[in-house]
Image (cartoon, coloured by chain):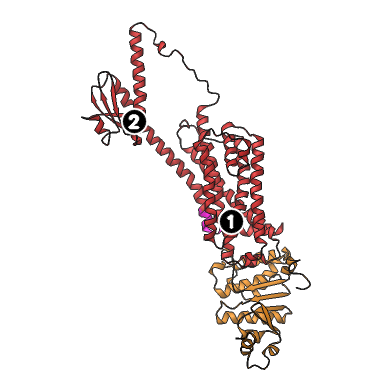
Chain colours: A red, B orange
Amino acid sequence: MRAAWIVYKKELVEILRDRRTLMAIGLSALATPIVLTLISQVSTKTATQVYTVGYSGQIPQGLDILLSSTGLKLEQVDDPASAAKQQVDLGVAFQATEIDEYYDPARQSAQIADTRLQTVLGQYNAAKAAAALQAKGVDPGILTPLKVVGHPLSSPVKAAENAFLSFFLPYILITMILTGGFSAALDSTAGERERRTLESLLMTPAPRSRVLLGKIGAVTTISLTAAVAAIGSMFVALSQISLPGSGGAAHITLNAVAAPVMVWVALLLAIAFSSLTLALGTLARNFRQGQAYVTPLYFITILPASIILFIPDFNPGLGYYAIPVLNAVLVLRDAIVHNTVVWPTLIVTSISLAALGGLSWFATLRLFTREALLTRS
Amino acid sequence: MLGFDTRGAPEEVRRRVGVVTAEIGVYPRLTAQENITYFAQLSEVSDRDLRRRVDAVIERLDMSAFARQRAESLSSGQKQKVAIARAIVHDPPVLMFDEPTSNLDVLASKEIRDFMVESKGRGKCVIFSTHVLHDAERLCDRMTIIHKGEVVASGTPAEVRGEHRDLEDAFLVLVGA
């Protein structure tokens, strides 16, 4: 194992002197807080944004106060329908017994203004109806014969935080592990071939399996460093900003079960990705060709995280946990959302990711022991 | 090689050989000294002897002035010295030079040729592959001419030259040009 340790140390020194890798790690640490800050600012702006309602006719008494308190500014216009096309966000024509509403669903501002208007009108109608019933001596409670009383079994704020984390954390973890080690893996394989150092390296008596082990170790270390930088900065950012659904002042934190699961999955992913990118880099004649081989991996890793975004209630059978990367996303989601570890799924996931790493290691070793590897250029 | 089969025991063979090629591949972000140390360690030089061996080879090849410089800032001749240093740092009995001077200027080429002669004087078996027949004639005790994968002549330079005016004429006749 001495040879593996020697290669590991040398690879780390070289990687840490490479601006590309340092930039990748630096960007990993900066990108997440920037994205989260932008999300926070956009959501805050949307929540406090005032939208304009162009109206004609007589406004029912009291409704104007309700509308302005909900961030809807009233502006009198001659033709609400044509004004709603561009001049204002929403057009309303107040008639004696009805309200005609004009809005363009293609405009997001119109959609938000419409939602606010519907909410306000619902409350206004309910209050008017209750007042009318009360004036006639009838209990307004008959309007809600079945009153629903909610008893959430966990904090709705925490649930919203977990839903956010269950998408964002696996996404950040997986992409940063891959992209963090991307440059280092290619530099260590295709880069060696391009610089003509691979021949000299493989002509030393060091067993090639040990050389490869040292390289995998170094790339895994860099991948994990990038992931730790990204996740660490994510939680620092989350402690400073509020996100939609997080309840404003509440700080998003990872539960006690999810943290060790995340560390374990991150380690397995880093080893698997390192082996895989080293295998692809070994196949490549130069760094640029290596990039072409490895880039599709990035898109493959985004897809599983997207499943969680678009199908939040996706509850697959155990077989799905054998699919690498998707299984990591699912296991992390289970740990974050349900605050529990389902051992069979974690075991299948671990075996699957270890098998991916093992197969990639074996494939790379086969390539390293082929003399043709030395003569290809 | 030295009693070991290159296919059956390649690691044993690699322990006993130092190879220098025309393609001067050195790790650009490591210093010259770090490059040599890395290969010394992989060639199983013990930790106790490591520093002494690396320093000795740096001194022998007159590399002290640039030993702590990163390889990316070295000239071709200096890089070739690093390549030679890493090939000999484990003191192998066999040295293979494959077109070692093809990318070098006149002065750097002379240093490499002098080094090969010096190594021969130290009792090393030096195998020198070249297309420069003048160099082969000057430096080698025995030579083999390979054409299209076949050995067409083998012996001392005088034996290979035979009755021809020089080695180049002999070569042209041997390959049927």
Q: Residue furthest left?
A: A78
- Seen in the picture, residue A113 relative to A201 is either above or below; the reply is above
Indicate the position of residue A301 as horizontal and vertical percent values. Answer: 54, 46
Residue A227 is left or right of residue B17, and the answer is left
Lower position in the chain sequence, tag 2 or tag 1: 2
Residue span colored magenta: A14-23
Looking at the picture, tell me which residue is in the foreground, A205 or B39.
Answer: A205
Q: Residues within 10 Å of mark 2 (few under 14, many from 20)?
A: many
- Front residue of B157/B54: it is B157
> In percent of the image, x 62 and y 53: which residue is there?
A275
* Amino acid under disc 2: Ala
Magenta segment includes A16: yes
Q: Residue A351: image x %, image y %?
A: 67, 43
Task: State whether residue A232 appears in this view.
Answer: no
Location of the N terminus of chain B (image quadrant):
bottom right
Structural crowding at the residue carrying mark 1, measured as other residues with C-alpha within 10 Å and reported as few (<14), some (14–19) or many (≥20):
many
Marks 2 and 1 belong to one chain: yes
Note whether A18 is above or below A169 in the view shown.
below
Q: Which residue is mark 1?
A: A280
The residue where tag 2 is placed is A113
Q: Nearer the viewer, residue A160 or A297?
A: A297
Task: Examine the residues drawn in magenta and state their main secondary structure.
Answer: helix
